[in-house]
Image: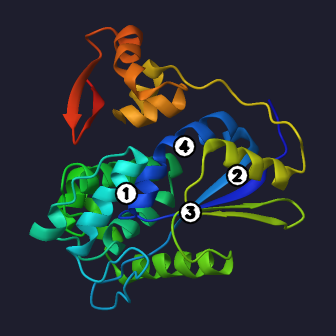
């Protein structure tokens, strides 16, 4: 089906906890309305280093260990769990290395870049991996890509994205900026529901109705995204969280996945 498209900038960052919390809503929004969008992902560059970090007064973050409490509080609100203890034991020094690898991958394969960004989020928020470490990044993607990305050229590309973010009128992550063919911008800065993003897309397109695609089956989704959290399943399929485990068992049987408990919720992983 052919639709008029709007340009959409999704501004994110590998260590943005609110971006992690937004995954359930964006999974569904992009699955149903991706045909309406020419999507571009920008790196917000929110942490060049702790030495130059100006502080985040709103969330009470001034040094590495301050992130732990904020991350865990936000995780409870969003339903996307975060451990966070690495920020005490082996803190992430910068979000730039992972962002630089993303920019390198994005040059040739946007799908691969987006899958890498997802794996980086899982690494830092769930697996307590220090994603500013080149060795950790090399376990997520070809080491040759990492070495090519950790250069001044790709550091500069992250700074370009950061300036583009500001020029679009967004100063924090996450943000979605919708730009129609007439150049009109509809900004959604922060975290919103799928319904609110639908409204923004309608405003950008100047339409009163959208024709959503069916959401993918859980089996097909698990092939694309090998780890899926309970909250993501609940949002994708309009389920109460209490029914998610039963739904998974019904849709997949017992051989396709393993269920892992994690900080008061669970995720499923492809076998």
Q: Secondary structure at mark 3?
A: loop
The residue labelled by disc 1 is: 74
Distance from disc 4 to disc 1, alpha carbons, whole Å, reads: 15 Å
Q: Give the spatial CA distance, label 1 vs label 3.
A: 13 Å
Circle 1 — which element? helix
Across and down, in percent, residue 70 comes to 32, 65
The kind of secondary structure element at disc 2 is strand
Q: Nearer the viewer, mark 2 or mark 3?
A: 3
Mark number for residue 199? none
Q: Secondary structure at mark 4?
A: helix
What numbered label is drawn on residue 38?
A: 2
Name of the residue lying farthest toward the left: 89
Query: Which sits in the foreground, 191 or 93?
Result: 191
Please tell me in which quadrant of the rendered image residue 52 appears.
bottom left
Between circles 4 and 2, the one closer to the viewer is 4
Of the two numbered discs 4 and 1 on the same chain, state the one appearing first in sequence.
Answer: 4
Q: Which residue appears at 83% of the width and 39% of the height?
A: 3
Image vertical order of residue 179 relative to residue 75, above or below: below
User: Who comes first in sequence, dot 1 or dot 3?
Assistant: 1
Neighbor class of circle 3 (other Cα within 10 Å; few <14, some 14-19, many 20+) is some
The residue pinned by badge 4 equals 25
First of labels 4, 3 by sequence position: 4
- The image shows residue 100, relative to residue 247, as above or below, that is below
Mark 4 vs 2: CB contact within 8 A? no
| Disc nearer the start of the sequence (2/1) | 2
Which numbered marker is on residue 190?
A: 3
Q: Quadrant of residue 260?
A: top left
- Between circles 2 and 1, the one closer to the viewer is 1
Task: Name the one closer to the observer, 260 or 163.
Answer: 260
Compute the Cα span from label 4 to label 3: 12 Å
Compared to residue 238, the image places residue 21 above or below, namely: below
């Amino acid at each position: 089906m052919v639709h008029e498209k709007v340009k959409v900038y999704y501004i994110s960052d590998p260590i943005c906890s609110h971006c992690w919390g937004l995954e359930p809503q964006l999974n569904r929004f992009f699955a149903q309305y991706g045909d309406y969008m020419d999507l571009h992902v920008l790196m917000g560059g929110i942490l060049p280093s702790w030495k130059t970090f100006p502080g985040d007064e709103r969330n009470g973050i001034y040094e590495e260990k301050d992130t732990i409490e904020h991350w865990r509080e936000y995780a409870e609100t969003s339903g996307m769990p975060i451990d966070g203890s690495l920020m005490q034991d082996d803190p992430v020094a910068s979000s730039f290395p992972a962002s630089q690898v993303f920019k390198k991958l994005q040059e040739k394969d946007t799908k691969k870049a987006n899958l890498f960004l997802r794996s980086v989020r899982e690494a830092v928020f769930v697996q307590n991996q220090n994603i500013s470490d080149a060795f950790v990044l090399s376990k997520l993607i070809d080491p040759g890509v990492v070495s090519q990305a950790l250069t001044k050229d790709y550091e500069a590309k992250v700074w370009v994205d950061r300036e583009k973010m500001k020029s679009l009128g967004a100063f924090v992550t996450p943000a979605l900026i919708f730009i129609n063919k007439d150049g009109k911008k509809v900004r959604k800065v922060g975290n919103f529901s799928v319904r609110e993003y639908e409204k923004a897309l309608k405003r950008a397109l100047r339409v009163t109705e959208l024709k959503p695609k069916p959401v993918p089956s859980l089996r097909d989704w698990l092939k694309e995204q090998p780890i899926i959290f309970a909250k993501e399943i609940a949002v994708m399929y309009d389920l109460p969280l209490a029914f998610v485990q039963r739904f998974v068992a019904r849709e997949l049987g017992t051989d396709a996945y393993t269920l892992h408990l994690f900080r008061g919720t669970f995720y499923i992983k492809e076998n």
